[in-house]
Amino acid sequence: SLDLDGGDGNDLLIGGDGGDRIDGGAGQDRCAGGGGRDKLLNCEVPVR
């Protein structure tokens, strides 16, 4: 549950997976990511 950077979990800025909100590869990324529930690049809903 880091707030800035980390590898996984619920990171808010930079991380590899989990509930990342900006950068990440999978999970529930909100801006950029490769899979999961991306909300900007994969066009679901915009970032709050």
Image: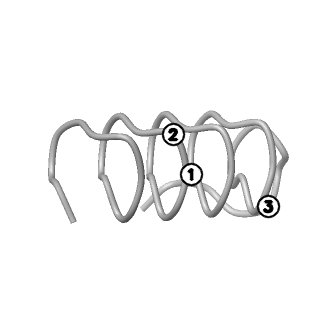
Res. 16 mark: 2
Relative side of 21 to 3, left or right: right
Position of the C terminus by quadrant: bottom left
Bin the neighbour count of mark 3 within 10 Å (Cα to Cα): few under 14, some 14-19, many 20 and up: few
Residue at x 61% of width, y 55% of height: 46
Relative side of 15 to 6, left or right: right
Q: Say which element carries label 1.
A: loop
Marks 2/3: CA–CA distance: 20 Å
Q: Say which element carries label 2.
A: loop
Q: Nearer the viewer, mark 2 or mark 3?
A: 2
In primary-sequence order, the first of circles 2 and 1 is 2
Relative side of 41 to 18, left or right: right
Q: Say which element carries label 3.
A: loop
Marks 3/1: CA–CA distance: 9 Å
Q: Nearer the viewer, mark 3 or mark 1?
A: 1
> Do tag 3 and tag 1 residues touch (Cβ < 8 Å)?
no
Pointer 1 residue: 30
Which amino acid lies under the numbered mark 2 shown in the image of this protein?
A: Gly
Which amino acid lies under the numbered mark 3 shown in the image of this protein?
A: Glu
Question: Is 35 rendered above or below residue 25?
Answer: below
Colour mapping used in the image: secondary structure
Which amino acid lies under the numbered mark 1 shown in the image of this protein?
A: Arg
In primary-sequence order, the first of circles 3 and 1 is 1
Give residue 36's quadrant in the image. Answer: bottom right
Residue 41 in picture, x, y percent from top left: 76, 37
Pointer 3 residue: 44
